[in-house]
Image (cartoon, grey):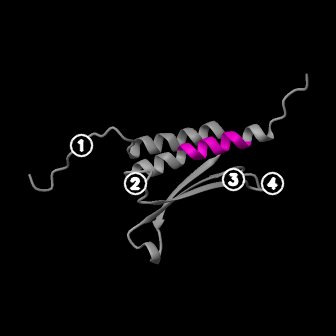
Amino acid sequence: MKGEQQWRASSTGPDWTDIARTLREVERLHTVWVSLRILNAGLRNSNGLRIIVSAFTNVLGANQDTGVVSLMVEWPNLSNATLEGAAYSLLIQLDHKLSEKLWEQTKLPEV
């Protein structure tokens, strides 16, 4: 039927549901607010997109500095076959980067 909605064929790679769930889990795990933006890559790459993920700490604290961790990738690229794969990969990298920052700031007890 014309105009009938159908489910998209399943795939083995990440989809937008995976991206939304991962974004929420990164926010919950690191107590940050995560932003995912997809922008035009600019004039030199008119067919490409720029994907940016950012994590903001202390969004509601008025008297402290807000920390920001951002990562960016242009798509299409050789590492990611799909836009969804590129966005998901960037969120995983953001999670890793935030974990590294936590360990850098954590002082272990002296023995």
Among the two numbered marks 3 and 1 on one chain, the one whose residue lies closer to the N terminus:
1
Q: Secondary structure at mark 2?
A: helix
Q: Is residue 98 magenta?
A: yes
- Relative to 18, residue 2 above or below: below
**Label disc, if present, on residue 59 of the rendered structure:** 3
Please provide the residue range marked out in magenta: 92-101
Q: Quadrant of the C terminus?
A: top right
- What amino acid is labelled 4 in the image? Gln
Q: Is residue 17 above or below residue 55?
A: above
Kind of residue at disc 1: Ala
Nearest to the eye among marks 4 and 1: give it.
Answer: 1
- The reply to whether the magenta stretch includes residue 18 is no
Coordinates of residue 79 in the picture (x, y in percent) = 45, 51
Disc 2: which residue: 83
Residue 61 lies, with reference to residue 104, above or below; the image says below
**Mark 4 to mark 1 CA distance (whole Å):** 47 Å
Between the residue at mark 1 and the residue at mark 2, the CA separation in whole angstroms equals: 16 Å
Q: Residue at 38% of width from left, 44% of height from top? A: 15
The residue that disc 1 covers is: 9
Estimate how packed mark 3 is, as few (under 14), some (14 to 19) or many (20 or more) residues with alpha carbons within 10 Å.
some
Instruction: Classify residue 109 as left or right of residue 44.
Output: right
* Label 4 sits on residue: 64
Q: Is disc 2 surrounded by few (<14), some (14 to 19) or many (20+) residues within 10 Å?
A: some
